[in-house]
Amino acid sequence: MSEEIRIYVADLAAYNNGKLHGVWIDATQDPDDIQDQINAMLAESPEGFAEEYAIHDYEGFGGCSVSEYQGIQSVHEIACFIEEYPELAGELLSHFGGSIEDARKAIEENYSGCYKSLADYAEELTEDTSQIPENLAYYIDYERMGRDMELSGDIFTIETAYDEVHVFWSH
């Protein structure tokens, strides 16, 4: 991922008085360092005594959203997970409603791999687990098999690009 994983933290005292004052912060750094940068930004507020802040923007989080008042520790954990698995983590977190534990389990225990299509996955799985007689091989509809696997809840997929489908077992 070429994009930094960062948050824009705004000074609410300045914001509420029509002034933009904030700072972009690397969300993968230690939470204490993030808090130090927020405190330094608030100390330089054009409004004098500023103590409240909010996350007004973010970049590099993939499909995962960050809320305005999300805790720094939580943002840091999400950012580190995305840094660890840049291609999939944001979408996995979105799929699991932000649960890092569920997303981590999916990628570490239930990940089947990346395929050009769900049909390719169904074909590989079938050929790896079954002896298909050559005269019957042409009659197998792998597209329907893959679709049925997903519809039944056995698997779920995350598409990250054209011809790039990541397959996960649901259990």
Image (cartoon, rainbow, N blue to C red):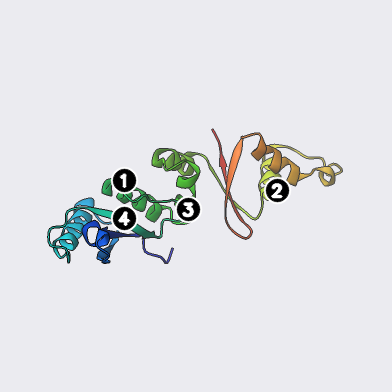
Going from the N terminus, do you reach mark 3 or mark 4 first? 4
Residue depicted at x 58% and y 42%: 156
Q: Nearer the viewer, residue 160 or 37?
A: 37
The N terminus sits in image quarter: bottom left
Q: Percent x, y for residue 136?
A: 85, 41
Q: Residues within 10 Å of mark 3 (few under 14, many from 20)?
A: some
Instruction: Residue 74: give its label.
Output: 1
Q: Amino acid at mark 3?
A: Gly
Q: Residue at x 24, y 62 (%)?
A: 17
**Circle 4 residues within 10 Å: few <14, some 14–19, many ≥20:** many
Q: At label 4, which amino acid type do we have?
A: Ile
Bin the neighbour count of mark 1 within 10 Å (Cα to Cα): few under 14, some 14-19, many 20 and up: some
Q: Secondary structure at mark 4?
A: strand
Q: On residue 119, which mark appears?
A: 2
> Does the residue at mark 3 contact the one at mark 2 (Cβ under 8 Å)?
no
Task: Please state which of the two labelled residues, at mark 3 or mark 2, is closer to the viewer.
Answer: 3
On the image, the x and y values in percent for residue 74 come to 31, 46
